[in-house]
Image: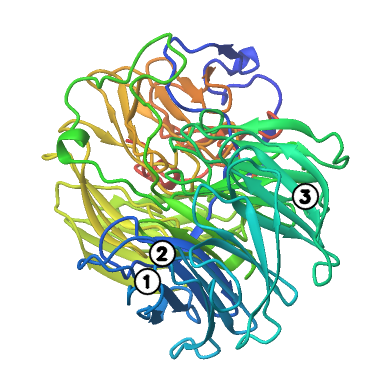
């Protein structure tokens, strides 16, 4: 776009003569449960859920292309299920290489094993049994044929028969007891895995039980259920008891902890309803200081509590039960800032819950807080996270849904852009001409014009990045058939939907690729073909609703959502909580113009009012309204990120003159340019209903 104006002129949309006056005011109706947070996409690479039933999986660890995942629950016959060994050579298709689950004759009377803990180091696995089988040391160099080397039990090696968690330190294994009456840790020498030997045991200062342990260099951190986190020096563990360096009062139900890379800060998770993530400054162990507390409420998530924290570099990864994976930037270690999240627990709702008739119960004007949205009381969802294979291959263990492999490498990158045909992170001026079925694009990267004959008169536009290469692909929907010209994958055609359906493509499974999807007005049903997780149907909405799917909660997945013109109401089902959200925002003649106007990578609810040319945005960062006059009654709203600053810019296309008008969010510059012909359909407005 090569014309810029900073003064009034005849081409300026009505209202711009007043320097595009913006009005900031508090919205009259608060959208419940949404708090400010900066979140960015995490892409799903693969998933495996080999066991039937819920509450099946526990801790995990990985090495190379091998992932070991413990189990928690029983099979259909009531037997425990040991440990699973996965081959993730192809992260998109994790394969269960083997299931290690021997019957242990003594002391468990030939019982199968509940392997709560699973570690792997140098091709040797260490599986900790929670039901009496001790620690199994297993040769997993061939994951398809694991071989038992030895077991550590009370009778062999002087360990515990029932183990909750284990830790490896040089040639030593440190284990705790699986029960609420043991603050004693045992140290076993495993320099010869075939002949483990007892070294010593030591009693921590906690009054109840040591639940978990963490190692940073030679320092051992114990998480005491009674509220004490001890710090020990293990340097001379082979010849003497560890030296207690200090204790931190971390509060009751201290479940697990991890330190910053430099060891100066401790991140502690407490496992209780509305449990929290606490940050301690431990540079002076004689006087540790609590510097920050993070709760589900402060993050705007719905989960019982955090479970396990892990630090890698400047990122803190937290498995947060029903809220899935939460990722924090700890460049300032005293102030973790959430930068991403991934939902591993897509809780199912019944059709009666999702069917929307009258306004739902959770809408209250002037109420800022939770209403009938109590935190869960059960433990479901993300149990464990292991990021040390690299940011592009982070593995997660979910209690119900098993193994996930996700890509977190773009955690510092910006989100996807509307109508970005050249992949430079900026929205391109782009049109579809129905009379000839031709697309016209002015690439923002080099201002070059490109054309493509693809489509026919009467087609519905459906441009999106279907092949995941960062470029918007040409797409049209015609009588239930999708025709796509993908920038990398080439041409494809697929029958999916009815002629009366409304296309609603987008990335519903967070794998970086837009999924084919339709909204069926007659029944208010969504049909989605997720490129990684497969097809699903969901009843959400009624006839007359306008589909407005977008990432309202910032987890990288599109949330199904509708705008109901008859009442000016929005209904949104966020993937992070699966708790219905709704608000009154707009009138019957308004047009939804959703976008990320404040740059927090959460989609903001917004409408354009043609009668006045006003834009009304409800910004998620501040939970307040931003109103702006930009356009006239005949203009077509074309919101997009035209300046590449990761914020949606207000923009319109004026059919009377075939001119584009854009107000850039980065610098407030007003740009305009003639581009198009009479009857053209602007691509950035493809999903402005």
- Report helix, strand or loop for mark 1: loop
| Residue sitting farthest toward the front | 155
Task: From the image, tell me which residue sits under label 3.
Answer: 231
Give the quadrant of the N terminus: top right
Mark positioned earlier in the residue sequence (2 or 1) = 1
Mark positioned earlier in the residue sequence (2 or 3) = 2
Query: Where does the image place residue 78, in percent across and percent down from the top left?
Result: 24, 65
- Report helix, strand or loop for mark 2: loop
| Residue sitting farthest toward the left | 522
Q: Nearer the viewer, mark 2 or mark 1?
A: 1
Q: Is residue 327 above or below residue 35?
A: below
Q: Residues within 10 Å of mark 1 (few under 14, many from 20)?
A: some
Q: Is residue 183 above or below residue 540?
A: below
Circles 2 and 3: CB distance less than 8 Å? no
CA distance for labels 2 and 3: 28 Å
Determine whether, in the image, residue 51 is placed left or right of residue 428. left
CA distance for labels 2 and 1: 7 Å
Residue 559 position by quadrant? top left
Task: From the image, tell me which residue sits under label 2.
Answer: 131
Residue 280 position by quadrant? top right
Q: Residue at x 44, y 32 (%)?
A: 637
Q: Residue at x 81, y 36 (%)?
A: 288
Give the quadrant of the C terminus: top left
Determine whether, in the image, residue 480 is placed left or right of residue 173. left
- Report helix, strand or loop for mark 3: strand
Residue 527 is labelled as none
């Amino acid at each position: 776009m090569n014309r810029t104006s900073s003064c009034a002129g005849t081409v300026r949309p009505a209202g711009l003569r007043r320097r595009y006056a913006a009005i900031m005011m508090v919205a009259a109706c608060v959208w419940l449960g949404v708090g400010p947070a900066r979140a960015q996409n995490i892409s799903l690479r693969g998933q495996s859920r080999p066991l039937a039933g819920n509450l099946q999986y526990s801790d995990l660890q990985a090495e190379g292309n091998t992932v070991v995942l413990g189990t928690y629950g029983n099979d259909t016959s009531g037997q425990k299920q040991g440990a699973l060994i996965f081959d993730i050579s192809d992260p998109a298709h994790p394969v269960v290489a083997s299931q290690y689950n021997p019957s242990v004759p003594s002391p468990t009377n030939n019982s199968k094993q509940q392997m709560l803990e699973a570690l792997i180091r140098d091709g040797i696995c260490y599986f900790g049994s929670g039901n009496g089988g001790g620690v199994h040391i297993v040769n997993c160099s061939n994951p398809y044929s694991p071989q038992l080397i030895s077991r550590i039990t009370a009778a062999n090696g002087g360990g515990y028969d029932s183990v909750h968690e284990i830790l490896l330190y040089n040639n030593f294994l440190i284990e705790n007891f699986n029960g609420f009456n043991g603050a004693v840790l045992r140290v076993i020498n495993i320099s010869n895995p075939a002949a483990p030997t007892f070294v010593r045991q030591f009693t921590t200062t906690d009054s109840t039980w040591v639940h978990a342990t963490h190692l940073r260099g030679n320092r051992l951190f114990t998480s005491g259920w009674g509220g004490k986190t001890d710090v020990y020096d293990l340097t001379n563990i082979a010849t003497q008891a560890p030296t207690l360096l200090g204790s931190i009062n971390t509060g009751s139900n201290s479940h697990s902890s991890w330190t910053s890379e430099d060891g100066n800060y401790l991140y502690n998770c407490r496992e209780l309803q509305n449990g929290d993530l606490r940050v301690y400054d431990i540079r002076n162990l004689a006087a540790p200081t609590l510097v920050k507390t993070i709760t589900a409420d402060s993050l705007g998530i719905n989960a019982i509590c955090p479970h396990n924290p892990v630090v890698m570099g400047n990122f803190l990864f937290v498995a947060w039960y029903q809220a899935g994976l939460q990722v924090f930037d700890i460049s300032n270690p005293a102030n973790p800032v959430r930068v991403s999240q991934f939902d591993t627990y897509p809780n199912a709702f019944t059709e009666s819950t999702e069917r929307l008739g009258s306004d739902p119960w959770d809408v209250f004007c002037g109420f800022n807080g939770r209403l009938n949205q109590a935190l869960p009381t059960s433990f479901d969802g993300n149990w464990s996270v292991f990021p040390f294979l690299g940011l592009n291959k982070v593995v997660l263990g979910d209690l119900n849904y098993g193994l996930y492999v996700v890509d977190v490498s773009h955690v510092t990158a910006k989100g996807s852009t509307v109508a970005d045909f050249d992949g430079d992170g900026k929205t391109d001026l782009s049109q579809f001409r129905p009379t000839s079925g031709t697309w016209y694009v002015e690439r923002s990267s080099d201002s070059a014009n490109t054309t493509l004959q693809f489509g026919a008169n009467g087609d519905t536009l459906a441009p999106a990045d279907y092949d995941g290469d960062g470029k918007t692909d040409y797409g049209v929907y015609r009588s239930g058939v999708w025709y796509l010209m993908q920038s990398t994958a080439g041409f494809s055609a697929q029958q999916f939907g009815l002629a009366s359906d409304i296309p609603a493509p987008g990335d519903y499974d967070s794998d970086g690729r837009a999924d084919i999807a339709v909204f069926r007005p007659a029944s208010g049903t969504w049909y989605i073909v997720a490129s990684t997780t497969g097809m699903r149907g969901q009843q959400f909405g009624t006839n007359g609703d306008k589909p407005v799917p977008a990432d309202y909660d910032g987890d990288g997945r599109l949330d199904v959502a509708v705008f109901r013109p008859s009442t000016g109401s929005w209904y949104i089902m966020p993937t992070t909580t699966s708790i219905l959200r709704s608000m009154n925002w707009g009138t019957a003649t308004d047009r939804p113009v959703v976008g990320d106007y404040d740059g927090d990578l959460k989609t903001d609810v917004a409408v354009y009012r043609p009668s006045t040319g006003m834009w009304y945005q409800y910004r998620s960062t501040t939970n307040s309204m931003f109103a702006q006059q930009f356009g006239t009654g005949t203009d077509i709203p074309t919101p997009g990120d035209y300046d590449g600053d990761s914020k949606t810019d207000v923009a319109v296309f004026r059919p009377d003159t075939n001119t584009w008008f854009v107000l850039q969010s980065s610098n407030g510059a007003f740009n305009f340019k003639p581009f198009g012909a009479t009857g053209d359909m602007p691509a950035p407005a493809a999903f402005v209903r």
